[in-house]
Amino acid sequence: MNIAHLLLGSSQEFRDQVALARGMQAHGSYRDLWRKVSVMSTHLRVRFGLEIGDRVAFALSNCVESIEVMYAIWHAGLCAVPMNAKLHAKEFAYILENSGAKLCFVTPDLATSIAEAAQDASALKEIVDVTTRAYSFMAVGDPSLMTDCEPTDPAWLFYTSGTTGRPKGAVLSHRNLLAMTLNYYADVDRPVAGGSMVHAAPISHGSGLWNFPMLARGVTQVFPESGKYDVPETVELMNRWPDCSIFLAPTMVKRLVEHSVVGDLKPGALRLISYGGAPMYVSDLKRAMDTLGDVLCQLYGQGESPMTITHLSRAMHALRDHPRWEARLASAGVAATCVEVRVVDEEGRRLPAGEVGEIIVKGDTVMSGYWNNSEATAKSLRNGWLWTGDVGAFDEDGFLTLKDRSKDMIISGGSNIYPREIEDVLNLHPAVAECSVVGRTHPEWGEEVVAFVVTRPGMTLTSAELDQLCLENIARFKRPKDYRFIKALPKNNYGKILKTELRTLL
C-alpha cells in the first residue's frame, strides 16, 4: 500500500481535469501531475541517492509545488517531514536533525532559515529551492515505477510540540493516511470532480492533510499566489474556482465573516468550511452560519490521530430546532466513524455520560508512535489506545465537550503553543528567577501568550530584553504579547505553580 496510489487512480479517472492551480491560473492536469511526480521520483532515488524509508523534509509557503513534492516523496517510497513555515531556524534545525532528513525542499522566503538550520543537521545532503532551475530540472527525465510500500511504513512524520519543550515526531503510516481519507468521505463530505479546494491555511497541517480526499476525487487544489491567507484573495479564488472546500482555523473563519468582501461571494462558490485547531465561540459560529449558510463542519483531532477524533457535521450544525442546539454547537461533536473514543479515569476505566475525564482514542488513524522516542510513545500509547491528554465529557447523545486542553496548551490563530517551550527560553536570561506562561483570551486570535516573570534580587529586566531573547530562539508567533513582572509565582503545598491563579489575575 502506497498512498501515492490515490494519484495514480486520479490520473486515470480524471486525467484531463485541472489538478493544481496557482491563483487564477491552472497549473496542470492530473495526467500532467502524475507524470511529473513519476519523473521527480527518479531524481529522488538516482540523483540524490535516497533509499526507501529515508526522510525528506519541506519548509514551504503554500504553493503548487508542495503537492508535487509530497507525492514524489511517496512515489519513491520515502517519508515526508512537513515543517511549519512559521518556525524559527533553531526549531527547523531540531526537526531536521531528529528526523535525519537527507533532503529539504524550500521556498525562497524560508531559504535563509533552512540554510542556517542545516548547519546543525548532520544527515542533510542538499536543500532545493522550488523556484530554481535545480527544481525545474526534476521534471526532465524518464518516469519511474511507483515503489511498493507496506501499510505500516512511515509516510508522514509530523512534529508536534510537547511539555518538555522539545518537539515529538508523530509517525503516520500509509494506512493511517488512507483511513483518514476514507473517514473524510464518511463524516465530512464527498467532494465532486471539478470542484476545488483553496489552501489558505498552512499546507504542513490540516489543510495539507485534506489534500488526500480532494486529490482522490479529482478536485482542483488551488494555492494563493501570496502563499498565505488573505481574505479578499481567498474570496476571489472561491469565485474563480467554485464549489470550493477550505480548511480554516476558527479565527480565520471569523476574519472571513467580518470582512466586507464576504458579500462578494457568488452563489455556489463556497461548498464547505471545515474548521479545527480550537473550538469556536458559539456567538461567532452563529454569525458565520447566518452569513455563509450551512457550510461549516468542525473537526477535533491531534497530530497523533489527524483530523479524526470527533466531528460536528454540517447537518448537526443546521439542526436549529433541536432543544440542545447551542450546547451541541459548543461541543466537538460525536466520535469519528473510523475510531472509538472514550472518556476515562486515571486507571483507564470508562466514565459515564456527564463525568469529566481524559479523552482516549483507538483506530486505524492513530499513529504508530513517536519517532525515536520510546519513552513518549509508551506514555501516550497504552494497549492500543492514544491518551490525548485532553479532558472532556460525553453527554447522553454521544456529543463530546472539551473541558480543558492538555499540558496547558495555548491555541492562538489555530496554532498550538506550548508554554514550556517559551518558559525554557525565558529561563535562559540570567535575570529571570522564575517564570510561567499562560494564555489570555483574545477577540481575534482566540488566545494570546502572557508571561509572568520573577526577577532575581538586585537585577533589572525589561520586556524588550525578553522579547529579543524569544525572537532569537523561537518562532515569532509564540513569543509573549505581554510580560507581567511579579514578586512571586503562586504555588501549592508541593511547590507546583498554580496557573489557574495566574489566569485569574488576568
Image (cartoon, rainbow, N blue to C red):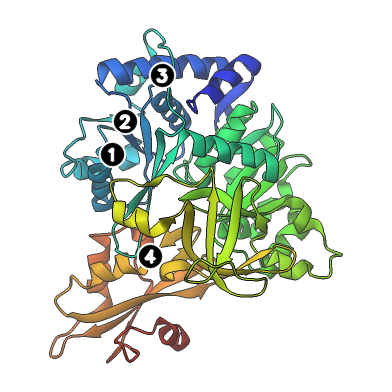
Q: CA distance from mark 2 to mark 3?
A: 25 Å
User: What amino acid does circle 4 point to?
Assistant: Tyr
Residue 499 quadrant: bottom left
Determine contact: label 1, label 2, CB under 8 Å.
yes
Label 1 secondary element: helix
Relative vertical location of residue 292 with respect to residue 330 in this rendering, above or below: above
Of residues 416 and 51, the one drawn nearer to the viewer in this rendering: 51
Determine contact: label 3, label 4, CB under 8 Å.
no
- Sequence-first tag of 1 and 2: 1
Dot in front, 3 or 4: 3
Residue named by callout 2: 129
- Sequence-first tag of 2 and 3: 2
Of residues 429 and 264, the one drawn nearer to the viewer in this rendering: 429
Residue named by callout 1: 111
Label 4 secondary element: loop
Residue named by callout 3: 147
| Residue at (36, 70) in percent of width and height | 480
- Sequence-first tag of 3 and 4: 3
How crowded pointer 3 is (Cα within 10 Å; few <14, some 14-19, many 20+) is rated as some
Label 2 secondary element: strand
Q: CA distance from mark 4 to mark 1?
A: 26 Å
Number of labels in the image equals: 4
